[in-house]
Amino acid sequence: MSDVPEAKRYEARVEGESKVAGVAEYIRTTELIAFVHTEVSPEYEGRGVGAALVRAALDEARAASLLVLPTCPFFAGWIARHPEYQDLVYQSRSRVSD
């Protein structure tokens, strides 16, 4: 798994293969990384590529002291099933309402 900042995404490749197996697209600021879309190529589905992308991306976010905004349903669902990563999730501090 590698971060490709110029493409604003993480890419996963299966060892020994050059084809991209999956991607996790993001928007990043100095304090926050929003994961907006995750996609795994059909031939790699069911092989743990998506989970590996999420785990590696979240580990890098933690190492960089970034909060995470999981707008992508795959990221949100994965985090919900892994409480050890829930401390990374951005919580709005705004008290403004309509």
Image (cartoon, grey):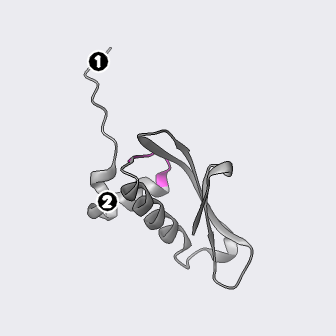
Q: Is residue 94 left or right of residue 8?
A: left
Q: Is residue 70 magenta?
A: yes
Instruction: Answer above or below: position of 58 versus 97.
Output: below
> Could you tell me which secondary element the residue under label 2 belongs to?
helix
The amino acid at mark 2 is Tyr
The image quadrant of residue 86 is bottom left
> Which quadrant would the N terminus be assigned to in this image?
bottom right
Asked if the residue under mark 2 is in contact with the one under mark 1, i.e. CB atoms within 8 Å, the reply is no
Tag on residue 37?
none
Look at 43% across and 42% down and name the residue there.
32
Label 1 or label 2, whichever comes before in sequence order: 2
Residue tagged 1: 96
Residue type at the position of mark 1: Val
Please rate how many residues cluster around mark 2, counting C-alpha atoms within 10 Å: few if below 14, some from 14 to 19, many from 20: some
Q: Which residue is mark 2?
A: 85
SS type, badge 1 = loop
Indicate whether residue 55 is drawn in magenta: no
Residue at screen point 45% across, 56% down: 75
Residue shown at 38% from the left, 58% from the top: 63
Question: Percent position (x, y) of residue 94?
Answer: 29, 25
Which mark's residue is nearer the viewer, 1 or 2? 2
Give the extent of the magenta segment: 67-73
